[in-house]
Image (cartoon, rainbow, N blue to C red):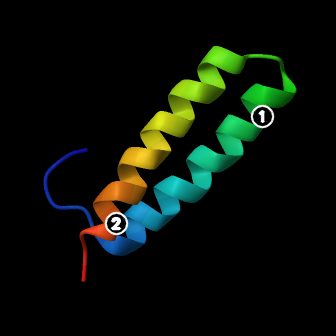
């Protein structure tokens, strides 16, 4: 993640990554879906540290 990211940007990223992960799963790309989920999890972790 780059420098300072707003809470809104993080939430948007999580939503977009969730859609991409679901698409990857539907297309049978399980490894890609898992990687996208890991990225999404890191954004959720970042969000949990925000006020």
Q: Residue at x 73, y 16 (%)?
A: 29
| Mark 1, secondary structure of its residue | helix
| Mark 2, secondary structure of its residue | helix
Confirm or deny contact between disc 1 and disc 2 (CB under 8 A): no
Choose top left, top right, bottom left or bottom right for residue 10: bottom left
Query: In the orientation shown, which residue stands out farthest toward the bottom?
Result: 51
Q: Residue at x 78, y 28 (%)?
A: 25
Question: Mark 1 sits on what residue?
Answer: 23
Q: Left of 16 or right of it: where is 23?
A: right
Between the C-alphas of marks 1 and 2, the distance is 24 Å
Whole-percent x, y for residue 47 in the image? 34, 66
Whole-percent x, y for residue 18 in the image? 64, 48
Q: Residues within 10 Å of mark 2 (few under 14, many from 20)?
A: some
- Quadrant including the C terminus: bottom left
Mark sitting on residue 47:
2
- Quadrant including the N terminus: top left
Q: Left of 47 or right of it: where is 14?
A: right
Query: In the orientation shown, which residue stands out farthest toward the right?
Result: 26
Name above or below for residue 20 compared with residue 8.
above
């Amino acid at each position: 993640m780059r420098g300072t990211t707003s809470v809104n940007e993080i939430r948007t990223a999580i939503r977009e990554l969730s859609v991409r992960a679901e698409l990857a799963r539907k297309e049978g790309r399980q490894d890609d879906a898992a990687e996208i989920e890991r990225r999404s999890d890191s954004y959720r972790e970042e969000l949990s540290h925000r006020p």
